[in-house]
Amino acid sequence: MGQGMARVDFYRLTRDPAERVLPAVAARILAEEARLLVVAESAMQRQAIDEALWSLQPASFLPHGAAGTPDEAIEPILIAGTLLSPAPNGARHVALADGTWREEALAFDRAFLFFDNSRLDNARATWRTLSAAKLAEIHFWKQDDRGRWSEGP
């Protein structure tokens, strides 16, 4: 268990899908010498995330692998179909790339919930639950037409 209360960052995807946004978040986490567990239930989405981590930022390949492989413990970024807690790679950050909140994410120091408009009501309900119960420090991020992120409602 991490120090203190978990932080949950809500990322509302209005322009780009999670696999296009995730590499920038993952790069920041790796720059802090931390590790990340990425959760996406759909095999197609996991494949898209895998490809994006290889190629989205040409100057910097983001080292990663899949859960259930022999090297999972050493991967800085681990992609899984379910939330594994504790993360096999020792990650203290979890990215819920499929838009589905999982209570187990609160066991991590920081959770990122990426959701599009089809999951907006679920995300709002999760926000209200976490806020009312004071279960986490919560932040909301939105994307503008140019693809830049800003904090706010």
Image (spheres, rainbow, N blue to C red):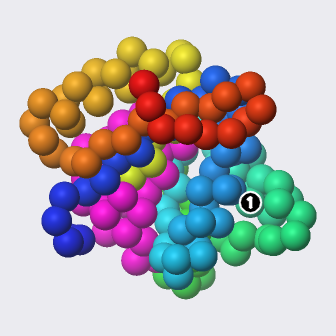
Q: Position of residue 118 (x, y in %)?
A: 53, 16
Q: Position of residue 100 (x, y in %)?
A: 42, 34
Label 1 crowd bin: few (<14), some (14–19), many (20+), radius 10 Å: many
For label 1, the SS is helix
Q: Residue at x 34, y 21 (%)?
A: 124
Of 121 and 4, nearer the camera is 4
Of 74 and 131, nearer the camera is 131
Residue beneath label 1, please?
53
Question: For the C terminus, which image quadrant?
Answer: top left
Magenta span covers which residues? 82-110
Q: Residue at x 44, y 31 (%)?
A: 152
Q: Amino acid at mark 1?
A: Leu
Residue 69 sits above or below residue 66 on the image: below
Is residue 22 among what the camera can see? Answer: yes
Q: Position of residue 66 (x, y in %)?
A: 61, 65
Residue 19 sits above or below residue 140 on the image: below
Q: Quadrant of residue 3?
A: bottom left
